[in-house]
Amino acid sequence: MSEKLVIKGGSQLVGEIDVRGSKNAATPILSATLLTSQPCILDNLPKITDVFKMLEIMEKMGSKVEFISDRKIRVESKDIDPKKLDFDLVSQMRSSILLVGSLISRFGYLEIPHPGGCIIGSRSIDTHISGLKKLGVFVEENGLKKNGAKQLNKYKFRAEKRPNNTEVVLDEFSVTATENIIMASVLCKGKTTIKIAAAEPHVRELVLFLKKMGAKIKGEETHTISITGVDSLSGAEYFIPYDYVEAGTFILLAVAGKGKIDVKNVPVNDLSLFLHKINSFGVKLKVKKDIVQISPWKKLKIDKIQTMPHPGIPTDLQSPLGVLSTQAEGLTLIHDPLYEGRLKYLEELNKMGAEIVLCDPHRAIINGPTKLQGTKLDPLDLRSGAALIIAGIIAEGTTIIRDVTQADRGYEEIENRLLKIGADIKREK
C-alpha cells in the first residue's frame, strides 16, 4: 500500500536537526565490500530504502549482513554468487549499477538488467560501458522480457585480457562511472589512469575506504585518478560520512521557511560554494565547526542558480533551491545542464501558484516572491520529493505529497525529524 505525506503549511520552524549518514557514499562503499572475502564493518549507515535494497541484493547473492547496532553493520561476502543477482531489485534502484565494478573485478563476469531509479531523464550507462571496455571487459547488451511483455535491457560483462597499463578517458564527469572504473581497476594488474574523473565527496570516501582495504590509489578529489592494481583486498572498518546533500536540503528548508534552525553534523568543507551563495542571497548564516545556524532573512534576491560538478552547486540541491527561488524578489534563472528531466518538479510548483516558465529541459525562469498554495503533488524523483516537502511546509493550506517513497530513498524518517522542528506533517496510508 502506498503512503503519502499530509502537510499543513505555515508553521514556525525552530530548533535543531541532525544530518545523518550519506546515501551517495554508503551505496558505493557497500558495493566495495564485495571486493573482499573478509568481513567489513560500516558505521553511521543511513536507514533509508536505497541502503536496505542494496543490502537485500547483497544478501541474496550470499553476503552475510549483521547489525551490530542501530547504524553499524558487519558485512561478510566470502561465499557470494553473482549469478544469484536479483533482477527485480536491481531494476528498481539506480545505484545498483555500482555492483558492476566490484563484481567484475572479483569474479570476471556479471549479468545485470538496466538499473532503475529516478525519472529525471535519460541515464544511460554508456560512460560506464566505454570505460570498462578500455579495461578489457567484453560487454553484450540484450533484450529481456519482464512479465511476458515489457522489454528491458540486460547487460553481460566478461573480463577478458586486461591490459597492464590503461588510460580511461570518461565521456563526462560521471560519479557512478568513476566509482565503477575505480572498483573494476583495483584488482587489475598494472596501472589504470582515469581522466575526466568525478571529484564529488562520495568518490573521495569510496577511495579512502578502498585504501583502508589495501588498494593503491592516488588523486582522489582531482579529475585524474591513478590506480595500481593489487592481488587482493582485506576487510576494513569505516565511518560513513555525514550527507552534505541532506545538510544542504535542511539549510534550504530553514531559509525558505524563515526558521531559526541549527543544522548539525554539516560537512561544511564540501559545501563551500553553496554556503557562500546562500549568504550572497541575503541570508546570514553562522558556521560553528559542523553546525550551521540559520536565522530569518529580511530580503531575498537570487539572480541565477547553475549546477556544476563538484566543487560547484550540486544538481541534487537544485530542486530545493528552485523552491527557495519562489520566495525571492524578481527573476531567478535556473540552469541544470545534466539531466533533461530534472526540472519537472517546477510544474508541480506551478500547481501551487508559482510563476515559472520552463524555457527548455535544462533552463527555467522563476518570478517571485509568490505565496504558494497547498495542493496535491507528485514527486518524480528523490530530490524533488524533498523539495516538494519544503514547498508544502512554506505554503498556505494543506499539501499532500502522494508518493513518499521517493523521499524515503534518501531521507531517513523525514517526517519525524521535521516534526521536531515545528513542521505540521504526518504520514498516511
Image: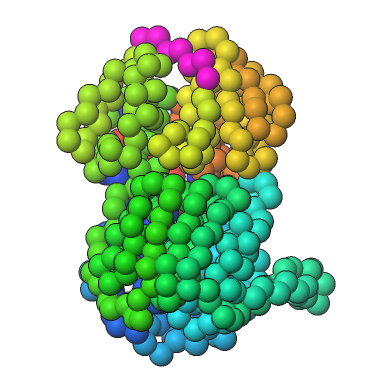
Query: Is residue 349 shown above or below 295?
Result: below
Residue 298 screen position, x and y as percent: 36, 9
Q: How many numbered marks appear?
A: 0
Q: Residue at x 44, y 34 (%)?
A: 312
Query: Is residue 59 shown above or below 28?
Result: below
Residue 284 among those drawn in magenta: no
Instruction: Report whether 17 appears left or right of 196.
Output: left
Res 10 → quadrant: top left
Q: Residue at x 58, y 33 (%)?
A: 336
Query: Is residue 109 shown above or below 10?
Result: below
Instruction: Report whether 246 appears left or right of 117.
Output: left
Looking at the picture, tell me which residue is in the foreground, 192 or 362.
192
Residue 208 screen position, x and y as percent: 29, 60
Residue 300 among those drawn in magenta: yes
Q: Residue furthest right?
A: 149
**Quadrant including the N terminus:** bottom right
Looking at the picture, tell me which residue is in the foreground, 163 or 112.
163
Q: Residue at x 53, y 77 (%)?
A: 162
Q: Residue furthest left?
A: 289
Whether residue 387 is visible: no
Q: Which residues are magenta?
A: 298-304
Residue 327 screen position, x and y as percent: 49, 18
Residue 313 screen position, x and y as percent: 45, 33
Q: Main secondary structure of the magenta part?
A: loop
Q: Residue at x 30, y 45 (%)?
A: 19
